[in-house]
Amino acid sequence: MAKKAPRQDVGDEALHVGSPKQWAAGVPGVAHSLEISYAQMGVKRAFLTLTQVNQKNGFDCPGCAWPEGDHRSFAEFCENGAKAVAEEATLRRVTREFFAEHPVSELAKRTDYWLGQQGRLTEPMLKAASSDHYVPVSWDDAFSLIADELRGLDSPDEALFYTSGRTSNEAAYVYQLLVRRFGTNNLPDCSNMCHESSGSALTETLGIGKGTVLLDDLYKSDLIFVVGQNPGTNHPRMLTALEKAKKNGARIIAVNPLPEAGLMRFKNPQRPVGVVGNGTQMADRFLQIRINGDLALFQALSQRLLEADDAAPGTVIDRRFVEEHTHGFDDWEKHLRDLDWADVEEATGLSRAEIDDTVKEVLGAKSVIVCWAMGLTQHKNSVPTIREVVNFLLLRGNVGRPGAGVCPVRGHSNVQGDRTMGIYEKPPAAFLDALRAEFGFEPPREHGHDVVDSIRALRDGEAKVFFAMGGNFVSATPDTEVTEAALRKARLTVQVSTKLNRSHAVCGEQALILPTLGRTERDGDRFVTVEDSMGMVHASRGRLRPASPDLLPEVAIVCRLARKLFGQDGIPWERFEADYDAIRDSIERVVPGFDDFNARVREPGGFVLPNAPRDERRFATVTGKANFTVNELRVLRVPEGRLLLQTLRSHDQYNTTIYGLDDRYRGVHQGRRVVFVNPDDLARLGIADGEMVDLVSEWPDGERTAEGFRVIAYATARGCCAAYYPETNVLVPLDSVAETSNTPTSKSIVVRLARRVMSVSG
């Protein structure tokens, strides 16, 4: 069966393409930040808001989870952080008059960009089963409707409770408490689609599903790998940290199928050399790897290290660390000795000389860090790949000492904190035991649905209510047509949101929009807390007047729904709503590492959570040690006439939030329906630069098509191509998932380029 993405109001008629940039940030980054900020907030509001971003007494940027150092500048934000803040602090409003003018069926045809540009939601809205319009509804009636639908289910497992990474620790904690008090572990979250593979691999090998480095470790490292990551767009403040690491003597190796401007040269706009000078060269070595070749690369590096130790015994491998702190080395070594280098070269697209030169870099480094993002986590073999990264680091003792370790770089600003607070469909028994001791009820023990299984449950009629705490589920998930049809089958969908997005237009028979405070806004005299990508927990205090008097904080939404659903059940929902210190006191008793939570989080900068591999070289695995693992190398071979597609963000984008229609660093302006292809592949396929094509993915259940993409000849790895999501999510089959983590394989989809009748010239 052929599937096609619904063509929305794309507005790509003005699309034009220029030359890619060879550097990131600089004056254009500052100018674009201010341009969007002024357009959304006005000059005065922009100044007052941006000067509070990531400050110790300000609010945490909603843009990403990169940590802040002790010494912070006056402008502690990046270009995309400024865009994220401007989108939330915008003066534009979506009112009841807007919904009266625009039926749901019309909104479903609009682009994510158009929807996001309409502004902040201002009051609760209800779409009744027989209506094509949202109309105002009181908060009390909204909670009554949700409670009635939940109580009317045949089983608590017929409800799904999604969470995005912007939710605070306090909101996430009471949310998971409500869900488990209701009787299910159906807590899918955005981690299922991004770093679930990291958590799965790291828990198995190191005993903790998080990274093992702090910001200071980057400054102490001799060698930093940046793998499958584009920090110039996705984590721009990371460039400042890498610049400091370079100043301290670190070397950087970039591993990516596309050359990324931020890893070529960085012009730090907060330094004079970044404004008038040439900036800082970032990557000392660029390995343009074929998509999905990372497992082969790290196996090859490790095999070469074994051979180097054979030539000079005891000088390469950290034998003492391996013997005292690891398990499984012998089996892993035996497996690696038989590595087929023809497979390595085919999988990676790299030469032996490139790999050998990289080995020399490793041999010259006493401390090594490997950073990665979704370029490693969204493949069928993502978990084995990350396990192989761990093997590479364990071999020379690069875990649990300064300047060394694993560094998965998270996206959303509190996605790691949400997991720490219990947003997880497979909760550990110890956490459930602690909840039982704290609140006196028996939490459900059966594992719940993750994102992919939630879509299947909706599709198959096994789930009937979908509740989303933030996010844009429809645009973030794979297999667009299947996902949209699944959500439309629900009896009720509920979206707790700050802004309009596609998930409000693709909804159940009944649908509620519950508007909530943004990170930038005052919540009385209360503050919330977040955890960054490196395990630092700190306070966040909004400063702006709420966008509407009818908004509620996320904590209040959860607690009021709980009171409507459960009545007087012995859990202090009313107190939790009024006093976030009471929530933090409960977190302290339930979640390890939060001793004296309320006092420590009031210290400037907050505190760091314990991390046993980093702090003690202690590994809470089934063996009690760090585990070497044997991972089979399977070369992903693409049929003749096909390419391997990775989905990615444009520069004017954060996840499914699209700030504008430009990708300045890649030379794309006023459009998004583009596909980047190596010129040699275009010649082989007989397709011209600038030609219009459809992207077609092939799967056993049929083809999926994303229509109307302009081809751009680009320096991608041969045999590979790239295009923006969410436009290409339709190409990712629901059943194409990573082993173990069940994460959609959005970074390795086999596609063909189907020529269209009409074409345009460059």
Image (cartoon, rainbow, N blue to C red):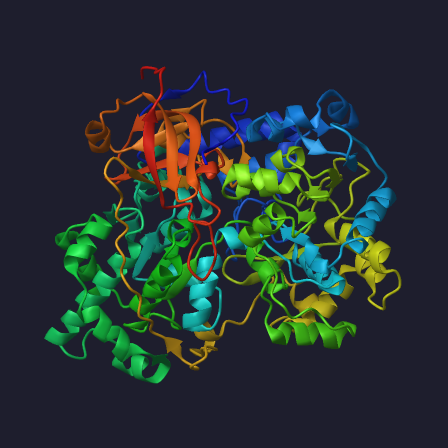
- Identity of the residue furthest to the right in this view: 568
**Residue 487 place in picture, x, y as percent:** 63, 41
Disc count in the image? Answer: 0
Residue 303 left/right relative to 531: left
Q: Is residue 212 visible?
A: no
Q: Residue at x 23, y 51 (%)?
A: 348
In the rendered image, which quarter is residue 700 located in? top left
- The x and y percentages for residue 716 are 28, 37
Q: Residue at x 13, y 53 (%)?
A: 353
The foreground one among 740 and 261 is 740
Q: Nearer the viewer, residue 183 or 413?
A: 183
- Residue shown at the point (54%, 42%) measured from the top left: 476
Above or below 174: residue 493: above
Given the current orientation, which residue lies at the most extreme left position?
311
Residue 502's place in the image compared with 212, above or below, is: above
x, y percentage for residue 94? 72, 28
Residue 172 appears in the figure: yes
Question: Residue 493's image quarter?
Answer: top right
Viewer-closest of 224 and 437: 437
* Quarter of the figure that contains the C terminus: top left
Vertical placement of residue 84 versus 735, above or below:
above
In this rendering, position of residue 218 left or right of residue 478: left
Q: Residue 243: where, in percent of width, then height?
A: 36, 49
